[in-house]
Amino acid sequence: MASRSDQCEPLLRNSVTYHENCPGCKVEQLKETRKGYPLKELTLVGLLVLCNSLPISSLFPFLYFMVRDFNIAKTEDIGYYAGYIGSSFMFGRFLTSVLWGIAADKYGRKPIMLIGVFSIVVFNTLFGLSVNFWMAFSMRFLLGSFNGMLGPVKAYASEVCREEHQALGLSIVGTMWGIGLIIGPAFGGFFAQPADKFPDIFSKTSLFGRFPYFLPCLAITIFSIIIFVATFWLPETLHKHPLEGEKKGDDDPELGSEDKSFQENKQVPQKQKNNRKSLLKNWPAISSISIYCVYSLHDMAYSEIFSLWAVSLKQYGGLGFSTSDVGEVLSITGFGLLIFQLLIFPPLANKAGAILITRIAAVLTIPLLAIYPFIGMLSDVLLWLAIICASLLKNILAVTICTGTFILLNNSVPQDQRGAANGLSMTGMSFFKTLGPTGGGSLFAWAQKRRDASFLPGTDLGYHFLQ
C-alpha cells in the first residue's frame, strides 16, 4: 500500500495539487518558483517554429525552374504544376492536423514535436533529390502529413509560461513563423542551382550539379537535425496523472482524504470536454479563426504569385530575376521584418491593441498590392528599390495581421480551450493554404496567357484578385 501511495500522493503547495510523477505538474511547480521568462524553453519554441516554416516557403524561388526541368509542361503552363506541388504540403497537413492534435493531448506535446522535426529531416531531403513531378509532389504531401507539430507548439508556448508571460510566448510563435516564411525563400534563392552560380566549387557532375535544388533542402535538414537533438531537453507540459491509482482509490478506504483530491482531479477532463463543446458558439474565437484562415489563403497565394512573377521572363510580364536575385530581396526583407517585430510591433500592439493594428494592416494591404504591376515597368536601381520596399511593407503587414489575429484568438478562449482552438485554426488554415498555391499558380498561368487583354492584362489580373 505504501508503494501505491508513493506513486499517487499529491503534493500540496499554496492550495494547488501537484502529482509527483506528472511532468506537467513539475512544469507548474517550476513556474511558481521562477518569476522571470522561461528563456531556454521560449528560445527552443522559436527555433521549432522556424524549423517548421522554412520548408514551407523555401521552394518558391526555385519551384518554377524545378518544374521546368521536369519537362512536364510548356512554359505558359508551369504555374499550374508549381501550384500543385506548393499545395501538396498544406493538403497533407489539413488531413492530419486533428489527428496529431489528439495524439498530442494523449501522448504529450514533446513526442509530436520530435516526430514533426524528424519528418522534415527525411522528406525535405528527399524532396531536394526529386527527379520528376510525382516524386516532388509525394514528398511534399508526406512532409505535410507527418509534420503536425505547429498546433502542439502553440499550446506548449502558452503552457510553459506564467500567465503574465503567455502573450510573449504566443508572440514569439507568430514572429518566428513570419521570419521563417521570409528566410525560407532566401535559403531557396541563394542555394538553388549551385553549379551554375558557383562553378568553381560545384561541378556539373557533382551531386549538387545533378540535383540542382538539393542544397537548400540539405541546409534546412542540417538545421532541423540540430533542433531535433535540442528538443530532447525540453520539459513535457502535458499532465499525466496516475489514472490507475485513482481508479483503485475509489474503492479503497485506506486512501482517506486523498480520495477527495483525486475525485476533484477526475472532474477536470469532463469539465474541459463540456467547455470545448461551446467553442463553436464562441463568436470572437470563431471570428478570429475565420480571419486567420482567409488571410492564410491570401498570403500563400501572394507568395506563389510573387515568386513566379519575379523569376518569369520580361516577355511574359515578369521581372526576369534569378533565384539569387529573389533570395537577396527576401533576405533584406527578412532583416527589416526582424527589426520591426523586435523593436516596433510589441509597443505598437500594447498601445493600439491587437484589433486596431490588424484592421489598419488589412486596409493598407489593398493599395500596396495595387502598385505591384507598375513596379514591373521600372528597371535597374529603381526596380530594386521599389521591389524591396514593397516586399518589406507587404510582409510587415502580413505578420502584423497574422500575429494580431493569433493574439485575439488566444485571448478569446480560456486556457483549457486553447488546444482545441489552435487545432481548429490549424485545420482551417491548412485547408485554405492548400488552395493558396494552387489558386495562385493557376491564376498566374492564366494571367500570362492574357498579356494582351484590354482589361487587367497579365500581372494586373493576379494582383487585382489578391486585393
Image: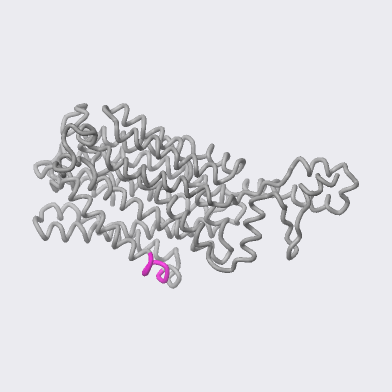
Q: Is residue 280 left or right of residue 58?
A: right
**Residue 453 showing in the rendered view:** no
> Could you tell me what secondary structure mostly forms the magenta stretch?
helix
Determine the residue positioned at 84% across, 47% down: 2
**Residue 87 showing in the rendered view:** yes
Residue 322 position in % (x across, y down): 16, 46
Extreme-front residue of the structure: 201
Image color mode: one colour
Determine the image quadrant of residue 343. bottom left
Asked whether 343 falls inside the magenta stretch, the response is yes
Nearer to me, 262 or 47: 47
Residue 381 position in % (x across, y down): 10, 60
Asked whether 227 falls inside the magenta stretch, the response is no
16 in relation to 54, above or below: below
Query: How many discs appear?
Result: 0
Residue 418 position in % (x across, y down): 56, 52
Which quadrant is the N terminus positioned in?
top right
Extreme-right residue of the structure: 253
Determine the residue positioned at 61% across, 62% down: 31
133 in relation to 433, above or below: above
46 in relation to 214, above or below: below
Nearer to me, 318 or 33: 33
Determine the image quadrant of residue 391. bottom left
Tell me where the magenta segment starts and ends, as one range.
342-348
Determine the residue positioned at 15% across, 55% down: 375
Nearer to me, 155 or 420: 155
Residue 279 position in % (x across, y down): 58, 49
